[in-house]
Amino acid sequence: MDLLAQRMLETKLKEFIKDLPVDRVGPDGTKWYIDPYGTDYARNPNSAGVRMPRATVYIFVKTDGAARMCLIEDDINRFEGFQVHDVGREIDRIKNIRYINSFKG
């Protein structure tokens, strides 16, 4: 991704979070916001009934202004990216893998 596209996506993320409360501030000053829509998407069941009940989607903004999204589950960063649909695709991928693995004995 080129720098201009990255900056445009960061700007959109910052516009989205302007009305969200800060969930936490990291020791380096990074501000973390919970994305309620992404988190609901992860926690709600898909068509196969698979959920990620301990997952949270965050948008974080570093002190230099760089903004990204990440999917955290059980204190593990499962995915990090700039675009909403990339996070959604990763949630779908994880749920599909868990569904397939549920058939293994």
Image: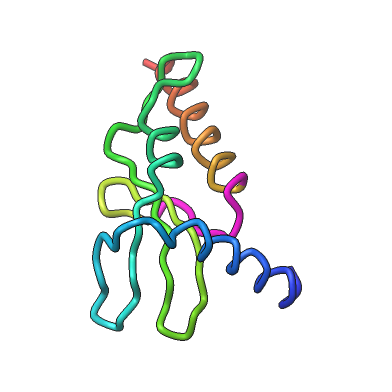
Magenta run includes residue 80: yes
| Quadrant occupied by the C terminus | top left
Asked whether 48 or 42 is in front, the reply is: 42
Q: Position of residue 22 (x, y in %)?
A: 29, 63
Please report the bounds of the magenta region as a residue range: 77-85
Is 69 situated left or right of 76 in this image?
A: right
Furthest toward the front, the residue is 19
Vertical position of residue 50 compared to residue 93: above or below: above
Magenta run includes residue 97: no
Instruction: Name the colour scheme.
Output: rainbow
Asked whether 55 or 84 is in front, the reply is: 84
Asked whether 72 or 102 is in front, the reply is: 72
The image quarter in which residue 75 lies: bottom left
Give the residue displayed 43% in from the left and 72% down from the top.
61
Vertical position of residue 79 compared to residue 26: above or below: above
Q: Position of residue 64 (x, y in %)?
A: 47, 85
Q: Position of residue 101 (x, y in %)?
A: 44, 23
